[in-house]
Amino acid sequence: MNIEEKIKNCEIYLKQINQYDPDPYYVNYFFTKFIESVIETFDIIFEEANRDFGLFISGKISQKEFDKKAITKNDQKAIKFSEWYLMKLLKNMKNHFQM
């Protein structure tokens, strides 16, 4: 599954949460699915980056594994990508949760 499909899944689960609110059973179910799909989206971003940067990481790829391999290979572009991604993620979270 590619990144666009993963993001679409996130959107679908979010709509389901809104549709079933305030029913706690369905809201909890779709919220769990939403969180799982967000985590899968993060993972696939680094799977695609692994291919793009040619790091050749096998198995499940996390940002931590990506960073380790990029540092080992001294791939400055991959390291910069990971730093950029983390900064964007933190900025978006900060903006989202600011009231």
Image (cartoon, rainbow, N blue to C red):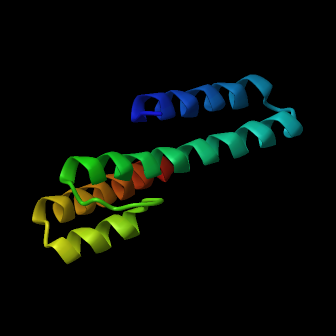
Q: Which residue is drawn at 19% across and 60% down?
A: 78
- Residue 8, image x and y in percent? 51, 27
In terms of depth relative to the viewer, which is nearer, 19 or 67? 67
On the image, which quarter does residue 38 sit in?
top right
Q: Is residue 35 above or below residue 2?
A: below
Q: Which residue is drawn at 38% across and 63% down?
A: 63
**Residue 95 rendering spot, x and y as whole percentages:** 40, 49
Q: In this view, does 80 lie to the left or right of 95?
A: left
Question: Residue visible at 62% across and 31% down?
Answer: 14
Residue 59 falls left or right of residue 85: right
Could you tell me residue 5's position as x and y percent?
48, 28
Question: Relative to residue 92, is residue 21 drawn left or right?
Answer: right
In the figure, 40 relative to 87: above or below?
above
- Residue 76 in view in this figure: yes
Residue 9 drawn at (x, y percent): 57, 30
Residue at the spot x=70%, y=26% of the render? 16
